[in-house]
Amino acid sequence: MPIIYLCPTGTYASLVAANLHLGQINREAKINEILNLPNFGAFPGKVGMFLYIGKDRKGNLIYTLGTSNEAQLIIKSTYDLLRFTGYPENNLKLIDVSKYVPKHLVWCNGIFLKYGNKFIAEKLHKKLAYIDEEVKEIRKQGH
Amino acid sequence: MHVIYHCYGGSHSSVTAACIHAGLIKDNIIPNAEKLLKLPYYDQQVAKDHGYIRYIGNDEYGNKIYITSKHNLAKDYETIMRSIAGMMEIPNDQLVFVDTMPYVNWLMVIGGYLSRRLGFTKLGRPIVIKGTQISFFKFSHLVNIIKTKYGRLKS
């Protein structure tokens, strides 16, 4: 089953969450480990791009997706799309982790690019335990 | 086939176009305020409703007509939805996304903002209705293109 983590760019909070899900980093990860994640802060301005991160132990395909600040809107639309096309809703999981990336930091990244990434990595590092808890819940749900 | 008309808030332009397509209003007569306000979801949806895909009706070719809102996602909305559809093995040729934003005039923007965003319905509604009436034949033209492409030519 595809599990898609959503954040404004698909390369910050969602990328960290996806890597926590796959066990490629843990809640004790250092800021540098976050900064060195493949594609961290890459593709600025590319909203709507999916990144395949890997497959978990249960065979779920883990993706990230950049949705600008409209993650909740995309979640509603997606489940409605599945409903009216007759596809089972529980065969797809969308998780919004946008709240771990303050909106203004993403804008900062657009302006300061290099330093913006470090700034966001520091913010995510502080929230790592919370993101990990959320990811654990997803894994616990038995998908 | 599923035809989804989308605009910023899913309250005016997409509703008007979808209702013309589904035959709830005639495409050659500009509707008066009363008729527009009777259309499903016309000047009704607020922020918490945004994103839901609402069913409006069927056209004469059996296509199902829907409306939705996409905020500022613009073309990214369709890209994202088509990618998700592809991921779930939903045939993409069964989905038609129609953007009604290019036909939205400034009266619709101002009226819609006043009525839906700020809640000044009494002030915004007459403005957005006037705007809809001005652009009505543009919506009608758009619907006819869609109907020709996905209805008449396929039947």
Image (cartoon, rainbow, N blue to C red):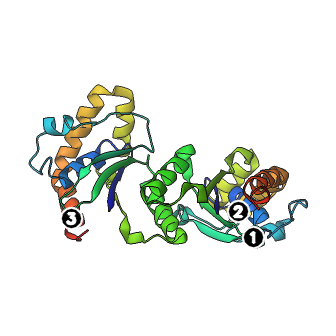
Parent chain of label 3: A
Q: Residue at x 83, y 67 (%)?
A: B25
Amino acid at pointer 3: Arg
Parent chain of label 2: B
* Distance (Cα) linking label 1 and label 2: 8 Å
Q: Position of residue B15 (x, y in %)?
A: 70, 62
As helix, strand or loop, the secondary structure at mark 1 comes to: loop
> Closest to the observer: B151 or B12?
B151
Left or right of A80? Residue A52 is: left
Number of labels in the image equals: 3
**Residue A9 in which image quadrant:** top left
Residue at which label 2 appears: B15
Residue ranking furthest to the front: B155
Q: Is residue B117 visible?
A: no
Q: Classify A47 as above or below B66.
A: above
Q: Are marks 3 and 2 in contact (CB under 8 Å)?
A: no
Label 3 and label 2 in one chain: no
Residue at which label 1 appears: B39
As helix, strand or loop, the secondary structure at mark 2 comes to: helix
Q: Residue at x 65, y 68 (%)?
A: B44
> Closest to the observer: A52 or B103?
A52
Residue at which label 3 appears: A139
Q: Are marks 1 and 2 in contact (CB under 8 Å)?
A: yes
